[in-house]
Structure formats: structure tokens, C-alpha cells
């Protein structure tokens, strides 16, 4: 087991290194000159100034040298200075990440807590009303576009019914809780500030539902299909022939097998939520990584783009590692 | 004879219902399908006395498995039990509520299923699966149940049960898993164990071990046993009494030895005679006795005797549906013909006069010529994925140096248990697989390392028939397309019309209606599909056909039909066969010479008769001894050699002789020196340091 984990870990490190290379090459070979994007017309026409500017940012060095510097800096936790914010990229990311982490985690929990039981019940009572409901929910979840769903939700619950708060993490006039983790729910709970906790929680409702919709649909559908497949297996009939209670058969025999594919899907979906909330964050004015990504992209802020891409790669690799390990725990056939 | 009589009197007849542990009356189970109602079990009546062993035999679709599942009400929709009575120890099983039923299952009645590979939950430890069976019925505490599970595993012949119990199912072989299933079955000391084809998925030596175990368990635990099987030999091994099922009905019932020696239903008669036997001399003709046709369409069962359309003894009265009538105490048959008490004639007399002259050139006549196929030192290693990033490189030594000649016109059988490399060998010969080392000469030409361009013209001359007639025919092509594709590819015909004629010819040659060329494979039965596979192999007019387990997925009567077809085709087209199978009786029947494979190596090669009469290698003797014979007397009179254990892994085979780890006469030299395959008698080769000494 430990050897299995070790080999997965080494593989993840190798992949991370490869990711840095790809990221570096992509950022340095895409068309689009940061000079033109960053400097005004007047400054860009001044050759001396441009050369000086290039030298300042190291853009005049050969490619491999820049890669070595890039790696060295990475090892020191230095992702460079954002061209547009003029602050260290790592610090920018540290500021923007908690909002995304909070939103994505709530959305992920929501899709698990609703999706898995719904999928299980749908499979157990096949073709009943609950099965039809589950299929409807997953169909809507998977097929409605995020921006559309977000606008509908905002228009209905905020604009129309006025039972949900508007965009943002917290009321515009309220003060954010004292930052410990950057996660408002945890920070406010730690500080005993329950008004802020309620406010932050209320603000999470709509964006997390919107963000969860597609994942919820996928998880419901996968759980249902995987349950149905497991229920057909010979060992279920054997368990029945042994006189095991039906509840025990579902919990003890069918579920452990049925959840194996759900773990893979769930893990990848979480990584996707963490890194792909651009639309939802933009619509809900959520100060998260998605918006930072968007802003960096339109200004061709290469250090920021590279930093974000690297973070995304690391998140995926880390979650993949977790999937591999939980796979080994769930399915004894994985580790020989 | 005195022995036989005393045994006969000990057979309990259904009349003694007072001691019956199970009493089934007029059981009817139907499948409510979209196409209509399938009467899978149609009025089945039998009973099982306490401690008795009852066999249920029949081909696929006869309703035997559905009967077994109905007894415990384990069937899912669309199957429903629509009538009859199942009484277990006097209690009405069909009237039980879910809780009563649950209390009965696994406690009073236990069941062992066909496929041990899928019967155990892959993510749960053996311990948990055994303990939960006992805990579910509240007989034992957790500690008691664990202790009992360990002792049961030991009783089932699993070594180091304390350690084994903490394993997961995938760490066990099929045979070991079936032992675990048996331990599970006996864990609550049931009064009745139902075993549905428990050895069908296992190799013959492992099958012998499991059958022996079932007999012992019946004796020691006193549980009655219902053994369901398609193989009469298996039933003869275990069961005192047998019922034969056909098209959802019981057609014959009686003490096993009497039914096998003197069948009173033509279907039983056909079942017995369709199977070649390893203990009988080959008859003059190699054709097996077969019956025509296939079982009736379950949606359109004939109103009269259900077997009548295929019955060679049919009389006018057979239009009327016969009842299961008493013939003698304990013997019943559902047949108008035998009702008078007359036995059925022996097979030869009834066989239609189609005995073809056996003009097959025997190997001795042509032995001087260069063999059509000459294999020397053939090796195939399959690389394994590394165990993690730093794991050592490993290979499966599937074929580990095989020498084999096949002479024109002969049939060479290759036998061995699963994993012995026989299928890999076949695929190497036709170069589906790339050999790792060695030489393959076909018709004088080296093909082991020849390029695809060199092999292509030779492919015409050697063709392969695969095991699975369902997977080996493209479901989206018509039979005509399937057969004409190779003809067109090799440009054998001038025009489309000529191709079509050739397709019709091929279909006729394999006994199918030429008009069927426009149909798709799914419209055919398994036996017909295998005929199509054979027709495809014949399409290029080859000289050499490699058949890899061509009959093992078929029912016995269909098997016999295909064997007869292969024999006929050989005579007609002067074919040479390499016939790969695990069924020794079939291989013996069809082959001139037989090669015995073990762990990728040839243990022995000899003429068929010679091999069975005077085998020189200990493994061959074990293998022959493990084959169950469908004759209760023969089963008892011969000494069964129990081959313990299972073949070692082909990843890390033993040094020297690869059989030495299981060989009773192994000496130190066997571990050091690999015995060469040496000619010990005329045409009889064996790879053993001590040939014939076992």
C-alpha cells in the first residue's frame, strides 16, 4: 500500500514538473506581445524604453534561461510579479483563492449530499416517481448553461421574490470577518460573529446551487447507473441467497462497489469546480480565482496566467492523487 | 451385483414424503417477456429425502436453473412463480412472507452458484462474507462465527485458513473461491444445499476436487444435495438419483445408475449417446449419435410430446402430451414409446445409415513426408504491467518452448487446463500473436518471423475457428457478407455471382440452408453460428484448420453435431486439424494424436488410444482420471487419482520439470534438470525423468 502511494506520489511530482514546462512554453510562445498589452502607445513607440522594460522583466533572455529562472523562483514560492496589479502573483492568488475554495467546496458538498442519495433511491425504485425526478434533475443540471441558470436564479430569488441576497460574498455595507483562513463561514464562526455567518451563508446559496447544478446532475446519473449495474451482479443474488437483510445488501454489498466510479467522477468534478467557476463568479461578483483568471487573461498578464495555470495543474494533480489513494482503499484489486 | 442391490434399496423413493426435506409439486415459473409468456418451468414435481443426493440434468434452456432459483424464490422480474407448491420440511415456501423467506435462505437451504469468480463480492474480505452469513441467522456470535469460518475453510481444503480468511476474493483462484462458496453454503448447517453448475467454470482436475468435496460434505454434514449440471458425468459422480429436464418439464426420473445404463426417455438416451466417453473403445465410425434440431422455441412449445419433433422413436401417439408415468418403483418417464416397459435400443441400431467410409489417411501412412506444420522451440512471453513505477519487469511465460508436428491429413488434439498455453499456441501458429522465439514451419516455409506480406498467401491455407460463436461473428454483417469477405479479399472469384454461389456452397457444406445468407448472426443459435464460423474458415479452401475450443460453449447434442460436421468435412476436403480443447473425451474422440500441455510446455504426445491406455507422464494420468464418466458403475470401479493443489503461476514457473511441484514421484533431479520431450515408444513422446513409473 505505501509503495503504491509512493509511486503515485512520484508520478504526481514528475507530472507537476512537466506541467511547469508546458505552462512556461505556452506562455512564452503564444502570439501576443506583453509590451503592447502593458505599455501605452506612447511608451511602446519609445524603443529605448521598451528595451529597458523588457530587460526589467527578463524578456530579453533566451528561453531556456528564462525557464531555469522560472523554476528557481517557483521553488522559492515566487510566481513572479503580476504585471497589472504589480503585486506578487502568489499573494494575489492567496487573496482570491479562499472565496473560490469556499464556493466550490459548498457546491461540491451540495452535489454529493443531494446527488448520491438521489441516485441510490432512483436505482432502488427504478421507474418510480423518484427515478423520474432524479432523471429530470440530472437532465436540467447537465444541460442548462451556467450563465442562463445564474441569471434565472438571480432574477427569480433576488430580483423577483427577494428572498435571496444579491451578488457578492457579503452585504456591501457589512464588514468581512477577521481573516484567519479567508473562508468567511469559518472565520465568522471562529470569531463568534453569527450575524456575519448568516450573511455569508445566505450569499453562498444561489452561486453554489448554480455552480453545483452540472456536477449534481453528473453525480446523480453516475450513482444511479453504477448502482443499477452493481445490483445485477451475481454476488448480490448470493447475498440474497444467504438470507442477508435487504438493507444490509444495499449498504454492505451494493454501495461499496457502486461508489467506486462515483469517487473518480466526484474527484475530477471537485477539481473542475475549484478551477472553472469563471462564469458563476463573474455573474455573482464573486471575488475568486475565476475572476482573477479572467482579468489576467484580458490584460495578457503572463506571470499571473502562468501562476494560475500552475495552481490549476497542481490542484488537478493533487486531487488525482487523492482519487488514486481512495481507489486503493475502496477497491482491494487496485493494489496487488 | 449384491452391492448394487443394497444400494438400490437405500435409494429413497418420493413415496416416503414423511422424510422429505423438499417437496415440489407442479411448480410453474414463467417469464413475462415482451414477446410473450415463456413457460420456463412447466409443472415440475419431485422431492428430495433428507440427506439424499439428487441431480438435475438438461441442456441450456431446459429450465433446470430456473427450477433451482424458484425453490428459494430468488428470481427477479419478469420471472414469476405462477403455480405449484414448494414445501421445505413441510413449510410452504411460496406462501412465506419476506422475513420468513430471508430466515430460510442460507439457513435451512443454501445455494452455490455456477461462477465462483463473480459470486463473491470483490471489495469485501472473505472473513466478512463468511461471518455475515452466520450472523444473519443469529446462530453464532461474532467470535464464534469467525472461529467457525476458519475451521470451515480448513475443512474445505484451503491451506492456512487463518490467513486466507483475511484475503480478498481476487487473491483466490476459481477453485479456491468455489471452496469458499461451499464453506459459506455449509456455514449454518443447512438441511439442503442446491448447487447450480458448481464446477462448470472450473478445470477438470479442480472439478474433480470440488465434486469429491461435495460428496464428502454430503456424507459428513448429512445435508441433502441438489446438483444441477448439463454434464451427466458430473451427476453420476455425486448423485444417487437424477431427474432429466427438457423444455421446462421433467422427462425422466430414477436412480442415476439405472437411468444412465438404461434410459427410458429418448431425450436422456440422446444425451447419453451424444457424449464421447473416455473409458470406451472408439467405435468403427467416429461419428457420434446425434438428434436433429434444437429444443423447441420457448414461446411456441408443441402441444404434444415436446421432444417428438426431434425424437428418432416417434410414434403416432406422440401428438398427445404424455404424463410422467411410473415404469418401476422410483423410475418414471414422460414417454409413450417406453411406457410398455421396453428399453430403448442401443445407439448404433437407431442411427441412420449415413456411416461414411473412413478414408482418412492415418499418420502412419504419410509419416515419411515433411509435416505440414513443424513447430520447434516455440516461446511466447507476455509482458506484465510493472507493479508501480519501480517494480521489476515481469512476463507471463504463456508458451515455454513447444515442439510439435502436424502431419497432413491428421488431427492433432491439444489438451490442458486453462492457463496451460494451448490457446496462445494456436494463435501463435496462425501468427495472431508474434512469437518471442522459436520456429514455425508451415508447408515448408518458415513463418515465425516472416513479414505480413509473406504470411498473407499462407493465411489462405490455414484458417482458424474460434471458441465463442457469439463474439467471433460481426453482428452488423449478414452471413453472406461474413462468408464472402475473405473470398473477395483474396480475389478467389471472378464475379459477384460466382462469390454468391460459393457462399451458398459453403452454407450447404456446413449443413445450413443456403438461403440463410441474407440473415444476420443474431438470428442463429449457438450451434448454427459455430457452423457459420466453420464455413468462414472453409471459405478460402484451406488445408489446415486450427480450432480453438470450437465446441466448449455448446450443449452436448450440438457438440456432437459439430464434431460430426468436422469429421465429415475432414473426409470431404482432406483437411488437417489442430484441435484445441479442454474436454479430454472429445479430444480423444476426434484426434489421431494428442499433445498434453501443462504450464506452457508439452508433457506428452501420443496417438489417442495409446495416450489413454498407457500414458507415460504422471500429469496425463491425473488429467484422465479427473474426467467424470457418465456411468455410475464405471465411476465407482475406477480409482480416482486426486491431484492436489493448483497449477503454479506462469510468471514464475518451477525450475526443472514444471509439474514437479504437484508430482507424486518427483525426485531431486526433477528440480534441477528439465526433462526433454523424448521418444519413448513408437510415436509416443513424454517429458518426464521417470516415465511410466507412476
Image: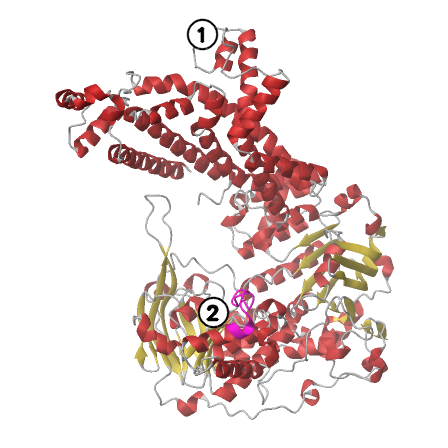
Say whether residue B263 is visible.
no
Where is residue B355, by image quadrant? Answer: bottom right
Horizontal side of A115 relative to B421 (left or right) equals right
Question: Taking B541 as reference, is B511 left or right?
Answer: right
Q: CA distance from mark 1 to mark 2?
A: 80 Å
Which residue is at a point 28% across and 23% down the rendered structure image?
A79
In this rendered view, identify the residue nearer to me: B112 or B141: B112
Q: Which residue: 84% across, 48% down?
A: B95
- Report the magenta residues as a range: B468-481
- Work out whether residue B358 can be spotted: yes
Above or below: residue B482 compared with residue B109: below
Q: Which residue is mark 2?
A: B619
Point out residue B43 in the picture as x, y percentages from the top left corner.
82, 64
- Relative to B238, is A283 above or below? above
Coordinates of residue B543 in the picture (x, y in percent): 43, 83
* Chain for disc number 1: A
Tell me if B346 is positioned left or right of B415 in this view. Answer: right
Q: Counting other residues with Cα less than 10 Å from the Cα at mark 2, is it few (<14), some (14-19), or many (20 or more)?
A: many
Residue B598: x %, y % from top left: 44, 67
Would you call the spot at circle 1 few (<14 residues within 10 Å), some (14-19), or many (20 or more)? few
Residue A178, label in figure:
1
Local secondary structure at mark 2: helix
B190 horizontally vs B683: left or right: right
Q: How is the protein colored in the picture? A: secondary structure
Check if residue B519 falls in the magenta segment: no
Q: Provide the secondary structure element on which disc 1 rests.
A: loop
Amino acid at each position: 500500500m505505501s509503495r503504491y502511494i509512493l509511486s503515485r506520489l512520484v508520478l504526481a511530482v514528475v507530472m507537476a514538473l512537466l506541467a511547469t514546462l508546458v505552462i512556461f512554453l505556452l506562455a512564452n510562445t503564444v502570439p501576443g506581445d506583453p509590451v503592447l498589452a502593458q505599455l501605452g502607445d506612447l511608451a511602446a513607440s519609445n524603443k529605448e524604453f521598451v528595451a529597458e522594460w523588457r530587460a526589467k522583466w527578463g524578456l530579453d533572455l533566451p528561453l531556456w534561461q528564462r525557464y531555469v529562472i522560472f523554476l528557481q523562483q517557483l521553488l522559492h514560492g515566487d510566481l513572479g510579479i503580476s504585471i497589472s496589479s504589480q503585486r506578487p502573483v502568489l499573494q494575489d492568488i492567496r487573496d482570491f483563492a479562499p472565496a473560490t475554495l469556499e464556493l466550490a467546496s459548498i457546491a461540491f458538498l451540495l452535489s454529493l449530499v443531494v446527488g448520491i442519495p438521489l441516485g441510490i433511491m432512483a436505482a432502488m425504485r427504478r421507474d418510480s416517481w423518484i427515478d423520474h425526478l432524479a432523471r429530470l434533475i440530472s437532465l436540467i443540471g447537465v444541460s442548462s448553461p451556467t450563465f442562463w441558470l445564474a441569471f434565472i436564479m438571480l432574477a427569480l430569488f433576488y430580483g423577483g421574490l427577494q428572498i435571496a441576497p444579491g451578488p457578492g460574498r457579503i452585504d456591501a455595507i457589512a464588514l468581512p470577518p477577521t481573516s484567519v483562513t479567508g473562508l468567511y463561514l469559518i472565520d465568522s464562526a471562529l470569531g463568534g460573529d453569527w450575524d456575519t455567518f448568516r450573511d455569508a451563508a445566505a450569499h453562498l446559496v444561489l452561486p453554489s446551487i448554480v455552480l453545483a447544478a452540472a456536477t449534481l446532475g453528473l453525480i446523480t446519473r453516475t450513482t444511479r447507473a453504477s448502482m443499477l449495474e452493481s445490483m445485477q451482479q451475481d454476488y448480490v443474488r448470493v447475498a440474497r441467497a444467504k438470507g442477508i437483510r435487504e438493507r444490509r445488501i444495499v449498504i454492505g454489498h451494493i454501495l461499496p462497489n457502486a461508489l467506486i466510479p462515483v469517487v473518480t467522477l466526484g474527484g475530477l468534478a471537485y477539481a473542475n469546480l475549484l478551477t472553472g467557476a469563471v462564469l458563476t463568479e463573474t455573474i455573482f461578483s464573486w471575488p475568486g480565482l475565476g475572476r482573477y483568471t479572467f482579468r489576467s487573461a484580458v490584460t495578457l498578464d503572463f506571470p499571473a496566467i502562468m501562476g494560475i495555470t500552475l495552481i490549476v495543474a497542481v490542484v488537478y494533480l493533487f486531487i488525482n492523487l487523492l482519487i488514486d489513494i481512495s481507489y486503493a482503499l475502496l477497491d482491494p484489486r487496485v493494489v496487488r | 451385483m449384491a452391492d448394487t442391490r443394497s444400494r438400490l434399496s437405500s435409494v429413497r423413493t418420493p413415496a416416503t414424503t414423511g422424510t422429505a426435506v423438499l417437496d415440489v409439486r407442479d411448480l410453474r415459473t414463467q417469464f413475462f417477456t415482451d414477446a410473450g409468456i415463456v413457460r420456463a418451468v412447466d409443472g415440475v414435481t419431485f422431492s428430495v429425502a433428507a440427506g439424499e443426493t439428487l441431480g438435475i440434468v438438461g441442456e441450456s434452456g431446459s429450465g433446470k436453473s430456473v427450477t433451482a432459483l424458484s425453490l428459494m424464490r430468488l428470481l427477479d422480474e419478469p420471472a414469476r412463480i405462477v403455480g405449484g407448491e414448494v414445501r421445505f420440511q413441510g413449510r410452504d415456501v411460496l406462501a412465506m412472507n419476506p422475513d420468513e423467506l430471508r430466515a430460510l435462505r442460507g439457513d435451512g437451504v443454501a445455494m452455490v452458484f455456477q461462477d465462483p469468480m463473480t459470486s463473491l463480492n470483490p471489495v469485501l474480505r472473505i472473513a466478512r462474507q463468511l461471518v455475515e452469513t452466520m450472523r444473519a441467522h443469529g446462530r453464532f456470535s461474532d467470535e464464534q462465527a469467525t472461529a467457525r469460518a476458519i475451521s470451515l475453510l480448513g475443512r474445505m481444503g484451503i491451506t492456512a485458513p487463518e490467513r486466507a480468511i483475511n484475503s480478498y476474493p481476487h487473491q483466490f483462484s476459481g477453485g479456491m473461491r468455489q471452496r469458499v462458496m461451499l464453506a459459506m453454503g455449509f456455514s449454518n448447517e443447512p438441511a439442503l444445499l442446491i448447487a447450480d453448475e458448481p464446477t462448470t467454470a472450473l478445470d477438470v482436475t479442480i472439478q474433480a476436487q470440488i465434486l469429491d468435496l461435495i460428496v464428502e460434505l454430503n456424507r459428513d454434514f448429512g445435508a441433502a444435495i441438489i446438483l444441477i449440471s448439463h454434464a451427466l458425468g458430473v451427476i453420476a459422480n455425486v448423485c444417487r438419483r437424477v431427474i432429466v429436464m427438457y423444455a421446462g418439464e421433467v422427462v425422466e426420473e430414477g436412480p442415476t445408475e439405472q437411468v444412465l445404463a438404461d434410459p427410458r426417455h429418448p431425450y436422456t438416451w440422446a444425451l447419453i449417446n451424444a457424449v464421447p466417453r473416455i473409458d470406451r473403445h472408439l467405435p468403427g465410425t467416429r461419428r457420434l449419435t446425434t438428434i436433429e434440431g434444437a429444443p423447441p422455441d420457448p414461446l411456441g412449445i408443441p402441444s404434444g410430446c415436446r421432444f417428438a419433433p426431434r425424437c428418432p422413436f416417434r410414434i403416432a401417439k406422440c401428438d398427445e402430451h404424455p404424463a410422467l408415468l411410473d415404469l418401476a418403483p422410483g423410475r418414471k418417464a414422460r414417454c409413450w414409446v417406453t411406457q410398455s416397459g421396453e428399453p430403448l435400443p442401443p445407439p448404433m441400431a437407431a442411427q441412420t445409415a449415413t456411416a461414411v467410409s473412413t478414408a482418412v489417411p492415418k499418420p502412419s501412412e504419410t509419416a515419411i513426408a515433411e509435416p505440414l506444420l513443424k513447430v520447434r522451440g516455440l516461446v511466447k512471453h507476455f509482458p506484465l504491467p510493472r507493479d508501480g513505477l519501480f517494480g521489476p519487469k515481469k512476463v507471463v511465460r504463456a508458451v515455454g518452448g513447444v515442439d510439435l508436428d502436424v502431419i497432413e491429413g491428421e488431427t492433432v488434439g491439444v489438451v490442458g487446463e486453462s492457463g496451460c498455453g494451448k490457446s496462445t499456441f494456436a494463435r501463435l501458429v496462425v501468427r495472431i500473436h508474434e512469437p518471442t522465439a522459436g520456429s514455425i514451419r508451415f508447408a515448408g516455409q518458415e513463418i515465425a518471423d516472416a513479414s505480413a506480406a509473406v504470411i498473407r498467401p499462407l493465411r489462405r491455407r490455414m484458417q482458424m475457428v474460434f471458441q465463442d460463436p457469439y463474439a467471433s461473428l460481426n453482428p452488423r454483417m449478414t452471413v453472406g457478407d461474413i462468408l464472402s469477405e475473405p473470398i473477395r479479399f483474396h480475389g478467389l472469384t471472378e464475379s459477384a455471382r460466382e462469390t454468391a454461389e460459393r457462399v451458398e456452397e459453403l452454407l450447404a457444406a456446413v449443413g445450413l440452408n443456403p438461403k440463410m445468407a441474407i440473415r444476420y448472426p443474431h438470428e442463429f443459435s449457438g450451434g448454427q453460428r459455430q457452423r457459420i464460423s466453420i464455413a468462414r474458415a472453409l471459405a478460402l479452401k484451406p488445408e489446415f484448420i486450427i480450432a480453438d475450443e470450437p465446441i466448449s460453449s455448446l450443449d452436448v447434442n450440438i457438440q456432437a453435431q459439430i464434431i460430426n460436421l468436422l469429421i465429415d468435412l475432414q473426409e470431404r476436403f482432406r483437411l488437417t486439424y489442430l484441435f484445441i480443447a479442454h474436454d479430454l473425451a472429445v479430444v480423444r474422440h476426434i484426434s489421431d494424436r494428442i499433445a498434453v500441455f501443462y504450464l506452457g510446455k508439452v508433457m506428452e504426445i501420443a496417438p489417442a488410444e495409446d495416450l489413454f491406455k498407457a500414458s507415460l507422464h504422471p500429469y496425463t494420468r491425473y488429467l484422465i482420471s479427473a474426467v467424470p464418466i457418465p456411468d455410475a458403475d464405471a465411476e465407482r470401479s475406477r480409482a480416482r487419482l486426486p491431484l492436489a493443489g493448483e497449477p503454479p503461476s506462469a510468471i514464475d514457473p518451477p525450475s526443472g520439470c514444471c509439474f514437479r511441484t504437484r508430482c507424486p514421484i518427483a525426485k531431486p533431479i526433477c528440480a534441477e534438470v528439465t526433462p526433454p520431450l523424448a521418444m519413448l515408444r513408437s510415436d509416443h513422446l513424454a517429458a518426464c525423468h521417470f516415465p511410466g513409473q507412476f
